[in-house]
Image (cartoon, grey):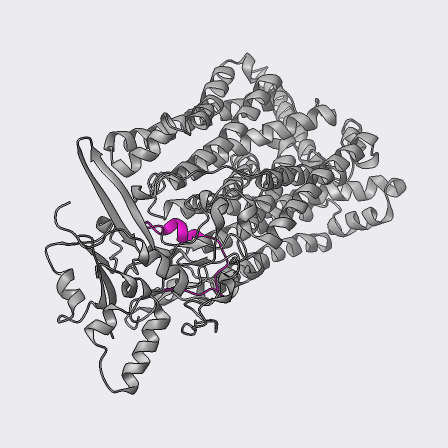
Amino acid sequence: MARVIAEQDMILLQPIMRTGLRFYLLVAALLAVITWGFSTYYRQLTEGLWVTGLNRPVVWGLYIINFVFFIGISYAGTLTSAVLRVTQAEWRRPITRVAEAITLFALLLGASQVIIDLGRPDRMIKLITHGRLQSPLLWDVGTLAMYMLGSLTYLYLPLIPDVAILRDHLGTQVPAWRRRLYQILSLGWQGNAEQRRRLEKGINIMAVFIIPVAVLAHAVVSWIFGMTLRPMWHSTILGPYFLLGAIFSGTATLVIAMTIMRQVLHLEAYITIKQYNYLGLLLLVMSLFWFYFTGAEYLTTFYGDLPDEMTVLLSKLVGEFSWPFWAMILCNFVVPVSILIWKRGRGVVGTFISGVAINIGMWLERFTIVVPTLTRPRLTFYGIGIYRPTLTEWGLFASSAAMFVLLLALFLKLFPAVSIWEVEEGREIVAAKQAVASIAASSEGPVR
Amino acid sequence: MPRWGMIIDLDKCTACQACTVACLAENNVPFAGPEETSMGRAILWHEVIGGIEGEYPDLWATFIPRPCMHCDNPPCIKVCPVGATYRREDGLVMQDYDQCIGCRMCIVACPYEVRYFNWRNPQWPEPMDQYLNPDQGPPQPTGGRGGPDVRPRGVVEKCTFCVHRLEKAERKAQQEYREMSEQELTLLPACNQTCPASARYFGDLDNPKSTVSRLARGARAFRLLEDLGTEPKVIYLKEGR
Amino acid sequence: MGDLSILGKIFTETGYGGAIVLIALLTCLAFYGSLIAWIARGKEE
């Protein structure tokens, strides 16, 4: 029966049963930041987007950068969970839950960035009532909504057996509304053979289904840039580049989240050096790929030497955007590669530092994609645009990030951080393998 | 059905900016003020762009009066998610202020940068607020009016080739059972009417006998960013450089 | 605009795209929902 929880796994229920002062302090701090963000947004709603640093020609700024950034982070779950599940990588088991949660929450925050950016959010419904399929923006609306619902389902399905464990084990230790919640969400899970078969099948279907949806969603995000005629946006590499960037930053975010979780919730027994080593290798490979993609794009532009493209390129290499550009190269390539190339570097500390660096670097990458191109209109008579984000924009960035952390914290307060039944299943598989090996060894014995 | 287009003779243009001012007054373009203007928030449906080109001592000045190009293949229409920008049968590219959701993708898509966003509520200093143009533009698909009607905050706007004046003149000609004269057409948009150098023409590009189509076929004719394939309907005339 | 084929119309006219997005979403919802319902019914087997 899946409902039986091993004694050693009881630690996973601790944060759900007991809530310390630390948690309330964290929530209070996050709520303070979020409140600040809402107050700045209220001002923007009532006075218009002039409270931002946006202008002509830089009509898109921090909001669109953060949109791409959060959507990029969402790849964490799809990759670590779905791809690793489909390829039956055993080491995924302790980290799938948090990866799937990151996906859902990052998507929610990402989608909200576009709404923040709209001049008339009150007319948003027109995207459905008057939507035009020709616009890349509508592709975004469609695929992101599909992706969001899919990731919600994909988070929920593997949660069912664990919710049943909570339902059966927590009893009166939690308030009545939570018992009711677990009761409903567990769908009457008893862990019988038919239920397990159906659940496994359902998860497998969703894992296979969500991979192409995610690929499409990340490509479509890039196409709101790539489908325009702007220099250095109108490029075929943008779709794959954004997809790769999403895998890169998603995995990096997963490393950060799981490290904090491991320290705060004492999950050292679950999230081991093995996970860090594999994720570190993944990040290393992605970093090299990212460098190759960047190099391919920039070399092609440089060699072609078209004036419109060159002015954008030079603004990044040596112009006013050289600071974010070279910081991006440092964070996305130099730092992670020089740490992760060593086996010792792929420990907790090294991988965590790389994860933080990559997240900063990937934010800078989105900045150097969105802003420099907009500052250089094709008609050079317009001169060069300048963009300085205001406190409103930074405030909304901070509160979006705080909202992301808050959603994750509340989720981990309600549900186990590690998928209990999947870890248990992993142990059974290891035990079964050992048993088979010992039987094989003993039956071979006499022959030899 | 005509295909309205504009000719601007750069050899006659003196870059006096009268066209820009006439446009602001005709189309109720809100005042941005010095601070917002320095941030790049001014709205200028018509603008004279240009500057000094070349290297010393071989220098020359270029000035290009720039309304909306009203492209035949407009990149802005393609990307609009809600159909707030559309092409009329007579070739005018219009913006429906009641439909626009303010995503600004059309601004990004337009290579000529002719589109403007209302960053805040439109405002005019006293006594300019008493002198707004009361003319009504043609009805838009969602029922509102195009043209000089005051636009709300959060939507995109741009040059309409003075569609309200055009339609008024069309109606008048119809009532009098006549075609619009060349002279009448050329002075139709406010920018053209005010041009002291008579450097601007307006008319039907599809009419082979019209002044605009004759000039458009001439050796001096060129269009901005022609290689992008947007097929702009504002045609410039210039002898060499 | 008369010579636009039906496909062109679906791509360019307002409303069609929104409807297609809505249909895609509802299909997804139905698919996810039935998957969950099917798993929930597993306890009776």
Q: Is residue B65 left or right of residue B209?
A: right
Indicate whether residue C36 is drawn in magenta.
Answer: no
Q: Main secondary structure of the magenta part?
A: loop
Question: Is B142 in front, or is A233?
Answer: B142
Question: Is A41 in front, or is C21?
Answer: A41
Indicate whether residue B108 is drawn in magenta.
Answer: yes
Question: Is A290 in front, or is C25?
Answer: A290
Q: Give the range drawn in magenta.
A: B94-113
Picture quarter with the N terminus of chain A: top right
Figure check: A368 above or below B35: above
Q: In this view, does A293 lie to the left or right of A20?
A: left
Residue A230 coordinates in the image, percent (x, y): 34, 44
Asked whether residue A217 appears in the rendered view, the answer is no
Res A14 quadrant in image: top right
Residue name at image x 50 percent, y 26 percent: A282
Residue A207 coordinates in the image, percent (x, y): 55, 43
Question: Is B25 in front, or is A168?
Answer: B25
